[in-house]
Amino acid sequence: MQAKRVIPCLDIRDGRVVKGVRFESIRDAGDPVEFAQHYERDGADELALFDITASAEGRATTVEVVRQVAERITIPLTVGGGVSDLEVIEKLLEAGASKVSINTAAVDRPEFLKEAAERFGTERIVLAIDARRQWRQDGALWWEVTTHGGRRFTGMDVVEWAKRAVELGASELVLNSIDADGTRDGYDNELNRTVAEAVDVPVIASGGVGNLQHLVDGILIGKADGVLAASIFHFGEYSVSEAKAYLRAHGIPVRM
């Protein structure tokens, strides 16, 4: 088993780190630069920075926030939120992003993934998917691709979309369960496992972490290559170093 990644997530609104439940009941958590520096010192493998209202408000992620964070850390930084054209990607990479996460724009125009991968390299292109559980008339479970913080339903099947996105050039998938987001009940590991078994690129589990066992489950049950979490780190319940020690104690290789 390859080393698994622990990735703190900084959800950004108006230049501040925030946390909510299913993208609602938002509360302020702090300064993104301070968080970023702290997480690097504590052993985070990467950081994810997502502007959670950028797409809904029809704008791109604030480049200046990305620059301020990137200037103060050396670990990889994945940035997403309102990434709608190649110019935005270029600006984010120039500001210091290691990888750029695309969501809504790729749903609206899948060819955008291919164009981005061809211009900037597949290793810099990540697809984020906000998934909601749905049931067909025969009772079969499926997951629907949503956008705009889970408020817009697309009718697209998550698994099929994931496979197509990989073919177009996405080198990594961040799977965020809207149903689990902020609930602290654990990842949707049925979703994660189903997608991980359908594609040959890394899958990052997102949404729902409430304790360290949920990280273990995300890897062993959900077959994720990395585990993304926010509130358990932001509010001091657990440190990244504690999370890594816990994973290691359960036989999961991590970089210490």
Image (cartoon, grey):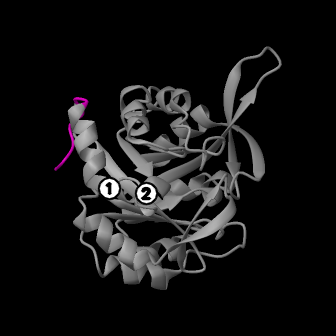
x then y, percent, for residue 218: 42, 34
x then y, percent, for residue 95: 39, 80
What residue sits right under mark 1 in the picture? 239
Q: Is residue 53 magenta?
A: no
Asked which secondary structure carries label 2, the reply is strand
Is residue 7 visible in this depiction of the protein? yes
Graded by Cα atoms within 10 Å as few (under 14), some (14 to 19) or many (20 or more), the crowding at tag 1 reads some
Q: How many badges with numbers are in the image?
A: 2
Start-end of magenta stretch: 250-256
Name the residue: 67% across, 27% down.
142
Looking at the image, residue 96 sits to the left or right of residue 153; the answer is: left
* Residue 150's disc number: none
x then y, percent, for residue 36: 35, 71
Figure quadrant of the N terminus: top left
Looking at the image, residue 104 sits to the left or right of residue 207; the answer is: right
Q: Closest to the observer: 116 or 207?
A: 207
Which residue ends up furthest to the top in the rendered image? 138
* Residue 125's disc number: 2
Q: Nearer the viewer, mark 1 or mark 2?
A: 1
Upstream in sequence: badge 1 or badge 2: 2
Overall secondary structure of the magenta section? loop
Which residue ends up furthest to the front in the rendered image? 237
x then y, percent, for residue 242: 27, 49
Name the residue: 54% across, 39% down.
162
Q: Is residue 255 magenta?
A: yes
Mark 2: amino acid: Ile
Q: Closest to the observer: 74 or 44?
A: 44
Q: CA distance from mark 1 to mark 2?
A: 28 Å
Is residue 75 visible in this depiction of the protein? no
Name the residue: 34% across, 55% down.
123
Name the residue: 71% across, 73% down.
58
Mark 1: amino acid: Ser
